[in-house]
Amino acid sequence: MPSGRRQPDRSPRAVHLGDRQGPCRQLDRASPHAPLPRSWPFHGRRRRSRSIKGLPGAESVTLDSYQQRVVAETSRLRLRELAYSDHAELAKVLADREVMHFSMRGPLTNDQTSAFIEANHSLYRERQFGMWAVEQSADGALIGFCGLSPIDLAGKEEIELGYRLTPSAWGKGLATEAACATVKQGINNCCLDSIIAIVASSHPASASVARKAGMSLETTTRFHAWEVDIFRYRRHDDKD
């Protein structure tokens, strides 16, 4: 059982958004195409919503059907699974040196963007989370990604919040809006007990996003030769 994930409740009751006792089992790695349990929130056509307290910009996170690939909606954004058809627009964002300035890997090539999408498809199947496309609700424009991914930190698996948005989306509170929705999705629906953010110590804007998403500074350390601040959100810090 990976760290950061609690033991699943195998009771047969239906699951609703924010339900802390949902079917959180990890799918068999030998069978990544195994079907999700019928009580999983993404099954069916009914939309379920729940108000979220304590996180600005995430007042109305909505889960939609798995078939529609929508994960969450806020007042201005829609978070959904990445699609192969996103490649052209996403590649522009991930090739931008300004966007990727604080990325360990730097700008991505077209092939690396393709691999990024494929890797997240695997995460969706195996872990029910990953990096999600972020698009504007008003016009459907893809502006980047935000989501969760497993990462090794000092020999321990952690679940990390990550995001990259195109520069035209900066300074509008959209990163905070997406991050708040992602944290709530991870805690309430992916049954995670803890989510971290690894922020370069020289990047106060991302530190501000982490704090607004309910995270607290835990420590400062070195990560891949970078001096970084580790922020953490724990389940018992949930305001609901």
Image: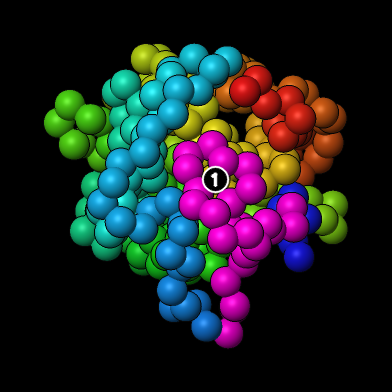
Position in image of residue 53 (x %, y %): 54, 17
Numbered range of the magenta stretch: 6-30
Q: Main secondary structure of the magenta part?
A: loop
Looking at the picture, how far across and down is residue 121, in whole percent?
42, 65
**Residues packed near mark 1 inside 10 Å, few (<14), some (14 to 19) or many (20 plus):** many
Figure quadrant of residue 7: bottom right
Quadrant of res 146: top left
Q: Nearer the viewer, residue 64 or 123?
A: 64
Q: Residue 215, percent across and down?
A: 68, 25
Image spot of residue 168 (x, y percent):
29, 24
Along the horizontal axis of the image, is 167 left or right of 225?
A: left
Quickly name the residue at label 1.
Answer: 189
226 sits to left or right of 170: right
Residue 61 visible here: yes
As drawn, 63 above or below 240: below
Quadrant of the drawing holding the C terminus: top right
